[in-house]
């Protein structure tokens, strides 16, 4: 029983270290002096911080439940440890997603980064159509009509990308106007 608790504490510590490494690596890409030709469209920073808060809260809950479980408190069961671990893991996944997801723009070249997908590099001219949906999200399609990525209107540098696509005369249609 105590071995299980120790194993979960080690897992929680490892997840905390992984979260810090992801946060540190993603903070290196912040550029206050954004260029209109070189930038990164990324998830809103508030999403990343909310997910990091969820991860930390899950870690704290796990440690508190572990303490009471080891003290022999009859009201704390292994289920509490499982739920707090899963809660924290979901927050860590959100941090990883928000750190990796995005579109890097270099002049007329796009790099699409998504979690659990290979990086996709394409030229602006490879984009066939852009649809702005009812919630102002931008959906990019290639020339063959295949969906490339959906970019929420709250994403950082969303407007820069939209202006670049307009300047390249790419067909942009608004679903919410129809």
Image (tube, rainbow, N blue to C red):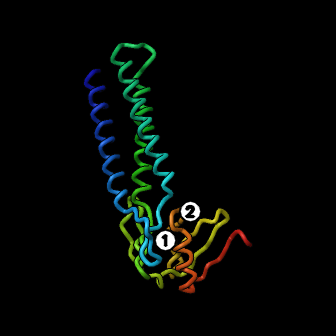
Q: Position of residue 149 (x, y in %)?
A: 50, 68
Residue 167 position (above or below residue 73): below
Q: Position of residue 18 (x, y in %)?
A: 31, 46
Count of labels in the image: 2
Quadrant of the snapshot with the N terminus? top left
Task: Please tell me which residue is depicted at 65% across the width and 77% down the height of the picture.
Answer: 173
Return the residue found at the far left: 3
Quick one: label 1, few (<14), some, or many (20+) residues within 10 Å? few
Describe residue 81's horizontal placement relative to residue 130 as left or right: left
Check the image and name the residue furthest to the front: 33
Image point 57% across, 86% down: which residue? 169
Locate the C terminus by quadrant. Answer: bottom right
Give the residue number, with chain letter if any, for mark 1.
148
Instruction: Determine whether the residue tagged by mark 1 lies in a helix, strand or loop.
Output: strand
> Does residue 75 lie above or below 26 as drawn?
above
The 10 Å Cα crowd at callout 2, few under 14, some 14 to 19, many 20 or more, is some
* Image quadrant in which you'd find residue 6: top left
Question: Viewer-proximal residue, 74 or 54?
Answer: 54
Please name the residue shown 37% across and 63% down the image: 29
Q: Which mark is residue 85?
A: none
Q: Residue furthest right?
A: 178
Residue 12, placed above or below residue 150:
above
Residue position for label 2: 152
Q: CA distance from mark 2 to mark 1?
A: 13 Å
Q: Position of residue 166 (x, y in %)?
A: 58, 81
Report the front residue among 22 and 76.
22
């Amino acid at each position: 029983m105590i071995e299980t608790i120790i194993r979960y504490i080690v897992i929680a510590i490892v997840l905390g270290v992984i979260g810090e490494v992801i946060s540190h690596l993603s903070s290196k890409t912040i550029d206050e002096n954004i260029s209109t030709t070189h930038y990164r469209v990324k998830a809103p920073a508030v999403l990343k911080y909310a997910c990091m808060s969820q991860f930390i809260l899950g870690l704290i809950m796990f440690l508190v439940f572990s303490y009471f479980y080891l003290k022999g408190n009859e009201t704390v069961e292994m289920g509490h440890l499982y739920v707090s671990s899963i809660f924290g893991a979901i927050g860590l996944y959100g941090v990883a997603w928000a750190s990796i997801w995005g579109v890097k723009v270099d002049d007329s070249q796009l790099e699409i980064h998504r979690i659990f997908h290979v990086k996709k590099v394409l030229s602006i001219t490879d984009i066939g159509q852009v649809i702005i949906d009812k919630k102002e999200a931008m959906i990019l399609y290639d020339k063959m009509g295949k969906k490339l990525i959906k970019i929420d209107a709250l994403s950082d540098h969303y407007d820069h990308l939209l202006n670049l696509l307009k300047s390249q005369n790419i067909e942009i249609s608004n679903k919410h106007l129809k």
